[in-house]
Amino acid sequence: MQPNADAEIEGDAGCGILTIDLGAIRANYAALRARAGASRCAAVVKADAYGLGAAQVAPALRRAGCDVFFVAHLDEGIALRAALGGGATVAVLHGPPPKAEPAFTAHDLTPVLNSPEQIAAWRAHAAFRRTRLAAFLHIDTGMSRLGLSATQVAAAAADPDAMRGIDVTLVMSHLACADQPEHPANTEQLVRFQALRRLLPPAPASLSASSGIFLGAAFHLDLVRPGAAVYGIAPHRARGNPTRAVVRLQGRVAQLRDIPAGAAIGYGATLRAARPMRLATVAVGYGDGLPRSLGNRGAAWLDHHRLPIVGRVSMDSLTLDATGAPVGLGALVDLIGPRNRLDDVAADAGTIGYEILTALGARYRRRYVDERPHPGTLPAGEGADSPDVREAVG
Ligand SMILES: *Cc1c(COP(=O)(O)O)cnc(C)c1O
């Protein structure tokens, strides 16, 4: 092998390129914060910032002025604290697992307390450390998932020792139906939340994630906690998408072939060519997080050419109908791009943008861009030499 052979295939060696626009992330955050008015705007970066890389995304949000971050698990909190350094609040939605309280104080993490058991353990930890400890308190108002029930809130409120040594710096709840603005559960949960809050000592309150922010000022309270909309997912799909696109997923054409009428395409021979076709096999499959349910649904794009997905999606590849389109070997086609945004691809796959993003996997070459150029506006391939572009294999 030539000494520089690897350098020559740089950028071509993976299955495709996942471009993540940190500038669009910051712009979406700024727009959400403006939308939330006087309310503070946190950012949810659980699941590795919805699959986009918390170590890159969270510091970018920090530079945009975000100083409260939410993750789901303790491990995520530890990693995020290391990425952010000191200063910002890092809250862990699931709270401390049994006996993990010392890890929270060691890494300066704020637990979200979801149950009487977690409250008791945090209270004991504060007593052991002979200090007061901050915590967020989560009340369930209609999801039956995490948080104190109404009965448990009332019991905690009636017991003067329940919160001894704990500074509740946020009381929060979570909306079940915020993506359906007309759903009566939204107002019901708001009313229930306000009533339960009043039983407890005064503390700032938070109810809304991305979609809730768009339900109006009554839902903003003191702090909002968007995740999805920061990453370009529409808060209310039926009302259009006010966010900027954050991800572009380009798959590489690994082979071109001309097939005669009657030839079978892919596993299960689910499709037979009705006419002679030119097929482009792209080196991206469900092993890269592209759902198998996209088989014979949806399309990739090359500039303004729509290339329908034909046959089943395999683990490492999928097949496009490239008949009549100027697709060359090695071309990068948009599996998620300006003409097929994340939510559109999710709808084609019968799922939601959240699931597509968090499934995107580790096989792509990841490219983080900032400011301009950004993936929503560029034709394929441009921008790679910009000094703003940092590339990471991930
Ligand atoms: C995931 C999550 C969020 C963020 O929700 P988005 O819909 O992504 O904005 C906010 N709060 C809680 C409790 C969550 O679990």
Image (cartoon, rainbow, N blue to C red):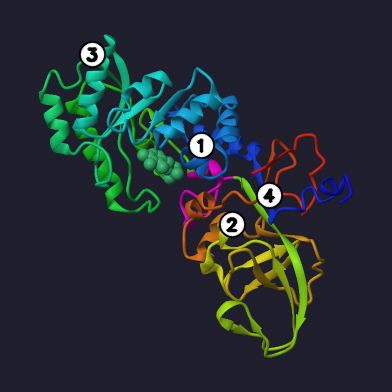
Mark 2–mark 4 Cα distance, whole angstroms, equals 21 Å
For the residue pair 187 and 84, the one nearer the viewer reads as 84
Q: Is residue 268 magenta?
A: no
Crowdedness of circle 1 by 10 Å Cα count: few (<14), some, many (20+)?
many
Does 54 sit left or right of 333 as displayed? left
Ligand 1 appears in which quadrant?
top left
Crowdedness of circle 4 by 10 Å Cα count: few (<14), some, many (20+)?
some
Can the viewer see residue 209 in this picture?
no
- Choose the circle earlier in sequence order: 2 or 4: 2
Q: Which mark is residue 288?
A: 2
Q: Which mark is residue 127?
A: 3
Q: Residue at x 48, y 51 (%)?
A: 354
Q: Which mark is residue 62?
A: none
Q: Give the percent coordinates (x, y) of residue 44.
A: 46, 36
Q: Nearer the viewer, mark 2 or mark 4?
A: 2
Position of 350 relative to 155 (above/below): below
Q: Give the percent coordinates (x, y) of residue 333.
A: 72, 61
Q: Which residue is label 1 attached to? A: 32
Q: Which residue is label 4 attached to? A: 376
Question: Mark 2: which secondary structure?
Answer: helix
Mark 3–mark 1 Cα distance, whole angstroms, equals 39 Å
Report if the CB atoms under discs 3 and 2 are less than 8 Å apart. Answer: no
Q: Which residues are magenta?
A: 228-243
Q: Nearer the viewer, mark 2 or mark 1?
A: 2
